[in-house]
Amino acid sequence: MASHRVCFFNAVPDSTGHDHHVCQRSIEISGAGDEAQAIQRAIVEFERLEGVSRWDLHARTTEYSQLALP
């Protein structure tokens, strides 16, 4: 099965007040059947690692990518 990477992004302002799209955490998932399952498993892991009950209160968006097989 393929491996997947899900990055959780947030908008973080710099010293001039301009927002930047910054990866808060990147999680690799293996054994997921498809993109939706990989994202759902990554959300559960993100919430556990960050100690939050809702991922979207800590990050704004996710970005998915399938990793190449070795």
Image (spheres, helix red, strand yellow):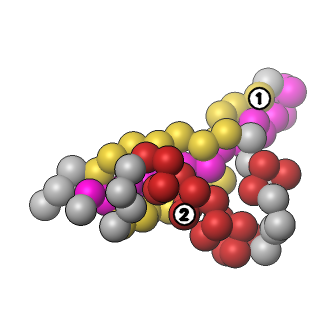
> Does 70 appear above or below 11?
below
Q: Residue furthest left?
A: 70
Q: Main secondary structure of the magenta part?
A: strand
| Front-most of residues 1 and 3 | 1
> Does 39 appear above or below 70?
above
Percent x, y of residue 49: 67, 74
Identify the residue shown where x is 13% and y is 61%.
70
The part of the image, by quadrant, that contains residue 62 is top right
Alpha carbon distance from label 2 to label 1: 28 Å
Task: Determine the secondary structure under disc 1.
Answer: strand
The amino acid on which the numbered mark 2 sits, given as a three-letter code, is Arg
Identify the residue shown where x is 35% and y is 66%.
30
The amino acid on which the numbered mark 1 sits, given as a three-letter code, is Asp
Bounds of the magenta segment: 2-17
Percent x, y of residue 8: 62, 49
Query: Label 1 neighbourhood size at 10 Å, few (<14), some (14-19), many (20+)?
Result: few
**N-term-proximal mark, 2 vs 1:** 1
Percent x, y of residue 51: 79, 74
Where residue 41 is drawn, which disc sits there? 2
Say which of marks 2 and 1 sits in front: 2
The part of the image, by quadrant, that contains residue 19 is top right
Q: Is residue 9 visible?
A: yes
Q: Is residue 7 magenta?
A: yes
Q: Quadrant of the N terminus?
A: bottom left
> Does 66 appear above or below 16?
below
Q: Is residue 16 magenta?
A: yes
Q: Is 2 left, or right, of 53 in this rendering?
A: left
Q: Which residue is mark 1?
A: 19
The part of the image, by quadrant, that contains residue 2 is bottom left
Percent x, y of residue 29: 42, 64
